[in-house]
Image: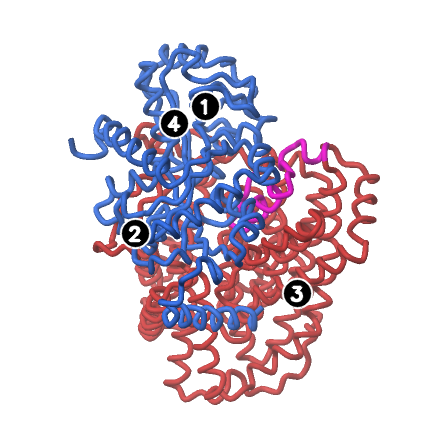
């Protein structure tokens, strides 16, 4: 391991040297190993998706792809670093909405701007789902909302992953749409939010669609924040069906450093398109209730721009940013 | 998800196939190395090997990854004892006792006790996992934010016993640790604290960098100053622990296994937390608490037993609820998902072969680790006799590589060196280092759970005293604080720089 680790570091040094010296030799892309950076901990949704894609991606690109992690600041560190990376297409990074929209709005020094990230492909989303415990008296969203209305504002608590996340924003949207006041309790991640509901420490949980599969033995899903029902969860009604306009979730995709040539972005986008249409990859994504998306560079950029307007509005209403 | 011997035997028959034995052995070996090398923790160790999952069958891959995780707890003690570099945060108390023992020429027995305590705790925990997993899983969720806060608060009250007689200095050291833990984003709101506009600092300061700096770098500086020729000049007679050692450590190992296992069921209670708690519990039970920080074999046994018990206990919530209790467990969860295995109560029903094969492999893995670790002791103990002009630079080299490899950031190296200098001055001035490490390990959970509890209670601190479990921890914490303060007043001990304060 020690030798491997040292060898790895030496290898990295050599590779980066080669990268610098062979800058002009990139006539045919890709001709060497591509680094796919994950901005969150191994084992999270971003990492799992990347691992699903790994083999098919190597095949589609015809070169080796190495998955590395750069974790910190809710992803900000990694994305800031990406904007300073050489735009040759050999370094790409997974990125997430709403993170890359909200962080530059909220943090004075996120280190990057939303539109700095050159969109390659948006490949999945995990819509928000509202959960209560299996043994809870609230069988439907209507039960839950009515019970919340009977309590003084703020008594019902709703857990979720992180603040200013899709869970947080989804809870706010529900509050507004239903005229209730749930107190949002942020947790370090989905992993630490789950036991809070299992143990009954929060009334409900706003989490992602993946949990509707993972925790189906213990949780009752009340509604999903999509426009129409998800194929893998046919019995789970949407918020809209039940009269509340809540459509929210986290999107995941890949981005390149600003200034990456469009031809290179296209090659990468085509590869990801092929990967996401690979039946093996699609099957794994579906099984785990990841909603597959197939947005190329233009469609991704359009989504990001649409979300920028939407989130700015919400953040102003919540008083998180100055009006 | 009940237990039956049929399942367990079935599990053994799968775990004992030659290829599963092979991957378990590979995992144990890598785990030991990962533990020995400071910085390369089990998370990165397992993550590096994730791509292998595309080639291996599910059972073999998870057996290997699991053995890396618990194997790392064996290896973590080695560098802690021999050169005072804790390989993982959970080995900090091991370094406090083990390095003292090494200086007394007893590195061999210390390493042997570490391996044996690890083995006993690991095996006992697998037995508990085998028979009581469904029952124990319920315990994992009774802790809500207020209970976590109360537990962490009690953990922080350990500062009093870690400080020896230098209580005021201990508290100052703790405050420094808490401050270091504050750097970066607020875990709840994302607000930036103490970052001075630097993007790098928003990530916070990695506590491996803090620990390696405080322990290893400051140690090298002190040794250079004293013109030390080697860590121990004493002839290493034997690596066999004496009967007295074994008798002393039996109770310690059993108590620490229980503490480590129960706390390990709770999501978020990493081995780094439980090993401190077990160490402190042992100090209270010990017949010779004055030996602690001067090379107490039972303190060392307690630490090593508890971190192994904790790592095994983590499999209970993982398998039963799909809850990862630690980052390494999250990686394992990812591994399970890649195979389309859905952790949760249904896993025991739908994939009994898989679950019981992994559990059976843990019995085998623990035996392998003991067999692997005992013969290596002969090799490790020679390190303490290497002339320091060779060993010193080697320690610095390992510390640099280890710190860098956690997140691949040059910045962490500067942090480590900075804390090396801080550690040097703290030692010179008689400030105990352990409270600072403890505080930096606990800081984030302490803060997160406090914020969450107060959100739930609308700002009322009574939430910590109206819930039975948190009340018990709060009372214990206040008793411990009260006792410590009383002892200070009664002893009227002047806060002089004593050997107590070395760590």
Q: Any idea which chain is the red one in this picture?
A: B
Q: Reading the chain from its start, which is encountered first: label 2 or label 1? A: 1
Q: Reading the chain from its start, which is encountered first: label 4 or label 1? A: 1
Residue designated by label 3: B29
Residue designated by label 1: A130
Image coords of residue B246 (percent x, y): 69, 66
Asked where in the image residue B298 lies, by quadrant, the reply is bottom right
Chain letter of the residue carrying label 1? A
Task: Tell us which disc is closer to us: 2 or 1.
Answer: 2
Task: Tell us which disc is closer to us: 4 or 2.
Answer: 2
CA distance separating discs 4 and 2: 27 Å
Badge 4 marks a residue whose secondary structure is loop
| Nearest the eye: B226 or A318 | A318
Task: Tell us which disc is closer to us: 4 or 1.
Answer: 4
Q: Are marks 3 and 1 in contact (CB under 8 Å)?
A: no
Q: Which residues are magenta?
A: B323-350
Asked where in the image residue A303 lies, by quadrant, the reply is top left
| Nearest the eye: B281 or A74 | A74
- Residue at 71% over, 48% down: B59
**Circle 4 crowding by C-alpha within 10 Å: few under 14, some 14–19, many from 20:** many
The reply to whether residue A99 is in sight is: yes
Residue designated by label 4: A248
Say whether residue B349 is magenta.
yes
Badge 3 marks a residue whose secondary structure is helix
Chain letter of the residue carrying label 4? A
Q: Are marks 2 and 1 in contact (CB under 8 Å)?
A: no
Q: Are marks 4 and 3 in contact (CB under 8 Å)?
A: no
Residue designated by label 2: A258
- Residue at 58% over, 81% down: B105
Image coords of residue A267 (percent x, y): 44, 49
């Amino acid at each position: 391991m020690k030798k491997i680790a040292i060898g790895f570091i030496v290898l990295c040094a050599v590779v980066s040297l080669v990268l610098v010296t062979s800058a002009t030799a990139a006539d045919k892309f890709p001709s060497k190993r591509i680094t796919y950076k994950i901005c969150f901990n191994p084992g999270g949704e971003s990492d799992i998706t990347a691992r699903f894609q790994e083999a098919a991606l190597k095949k589609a690109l015809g070169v080796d792809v190495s998955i590395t992690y750069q974790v910190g600041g809710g992803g900000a560190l990694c994305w800031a670093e990406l904007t300073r990376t050489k735009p040759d297409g050999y370094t790409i990074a997974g990125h997430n909405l709403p993170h890359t929209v909200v962080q530059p709005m909220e943090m004075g020094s996120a280190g990057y701007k939303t539109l700095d990230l050159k969109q390659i492909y948006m490949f999945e989303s995990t819509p928000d789902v509202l959960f209560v415990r299996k043994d809870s008296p609230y069988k439907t969203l209507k039960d839950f909302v009515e019970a919340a209305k009977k309590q003084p504002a703020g008594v019902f608590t709703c857990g979720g992953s992180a603040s200013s996340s899709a869970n947080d924003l989804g809870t706010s949207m529900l509050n507004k749409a239903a005229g209730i006041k749930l107190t949002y309790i942020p947790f370090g991640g989905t992993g630490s939010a789950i036991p809070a509901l299992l143990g009954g420490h929060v009334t409900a949980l706003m989490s992602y669609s993946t949990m509707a599969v993972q925790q189906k033995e213990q949780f009752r899903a009340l509604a999903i924040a999509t426009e129409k029902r998800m194929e893998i969860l046919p019995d789970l009604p949407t918020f809209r069906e039940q009269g509340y306009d809540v459509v929210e979730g986290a999107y995941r995709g890949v981005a390149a450093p600003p200034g990456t040539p469009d031809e290179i972005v296209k090659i990468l986008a085509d590869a990801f398109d092929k990967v996401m249409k690979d039946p093996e990859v699609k099957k794994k994504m579906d099984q785990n209730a990841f909603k597959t998306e197939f947005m190329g560079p233009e469609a991704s950029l359009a989504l990001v721009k649409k979300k920028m307007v939407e989130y700015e509005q919400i953040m102003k209403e919540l008083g998180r940013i100055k009006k | 998800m009940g237990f039956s011997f049929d399942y367990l035997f079935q599990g053994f028959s799968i775990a004992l196939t030659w290829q599963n034995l092979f991957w378990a052995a590979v995992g144990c070996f890598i785990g030991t190395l990962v533990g020995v090398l400071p910085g390369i923790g089990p998370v990165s160790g397992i993550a590096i090997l994730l791509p292998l999952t595309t080639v291996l069958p599910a059972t073999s891959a998870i057996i290997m990854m699991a053995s890396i995780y618990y194997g790392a707890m064996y290896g973590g003690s080695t560098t802690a004892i021999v050169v005072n570099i804790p390989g993982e945060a959970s080995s900090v108390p091991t370094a406090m006792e083990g390095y003292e023992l090494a200086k007394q020429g007893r590195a061999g027995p210390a390493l042997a006790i570490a391996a044996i305590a690890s083995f006993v705790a690991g095996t006992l925990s697998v037995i508990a996992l085998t028979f009581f997993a469904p029952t124990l899983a319920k315990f994992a969720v009774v802790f809500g934010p207020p209970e976590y806060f109360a537990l962490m608060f009690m953990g922080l009250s350990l500062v009093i016993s870690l400080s020896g007689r230098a209580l005021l200095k201990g508290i100052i050291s703790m405050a420094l640790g808490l401050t270091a833990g504050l750097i970066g984003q607020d875990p709840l709101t994302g607000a930036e604290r103490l970052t001075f506009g630097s993007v790098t600092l928003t990530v916070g300061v990695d506590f491996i960098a803090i620990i390696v700096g405080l322990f290893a770098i400051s140690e090298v500086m002190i040794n250079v100053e004293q013109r030390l020729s080697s860590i121990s000049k004493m002839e290493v007679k034997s690596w066999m622990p004496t009967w007295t050692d074994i008798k002393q450590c039996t109770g310690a190992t059993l108590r620490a296994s229980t503490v480590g296992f129960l706390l390990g069921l709770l999501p978020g209670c990493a081995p780094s937390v439980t090993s401190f708690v077990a160490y402190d519990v042992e100090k209270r039970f010990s017949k010779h608490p004055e030996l602690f920080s001067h090379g107490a074999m039972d303190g060392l046994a307690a630490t090593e037993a508890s971190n192994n018990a904790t790592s095994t206990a983590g499999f209970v919530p993982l398998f039963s609820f799909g809850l990862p209790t630690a980052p390494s467990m999250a990686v394992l969860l990812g591994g399970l998902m890649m195979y389309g295995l859905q952790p949760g109560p249904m896993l025991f029903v739908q994939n009994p072969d898989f679950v019981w094969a992994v559990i059976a492999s843990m019995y085998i893995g623990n035996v392998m680790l003991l067999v692997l670790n005992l013969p290596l002791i002969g090799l490790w103990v020679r390190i303490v006799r290497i002339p320091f002009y060779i060993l010193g630079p080697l320690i610095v080299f390992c510390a640099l590589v280890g710190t860098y490899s956690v997140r691949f950031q040059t910045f962490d190296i500067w942090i480590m060196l900075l804390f090396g200098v801080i550690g040097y001055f703290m030692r010179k001035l008689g400030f105990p280092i352990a409270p600072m490490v403890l505080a930096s390990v606990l800081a984030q959970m302490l803060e997160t759970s406090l914020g969450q509890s107060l959100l739930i209670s609308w700002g009322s601190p009574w939430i910590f005293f109206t819930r039975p479990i948190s009340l018990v921890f709060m009372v214990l914490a206040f008793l411990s604080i009260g006792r410590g303060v009383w002892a200070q007043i009664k002893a009227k001990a002047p806060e002089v720089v004593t050997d107590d304060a070395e760590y």
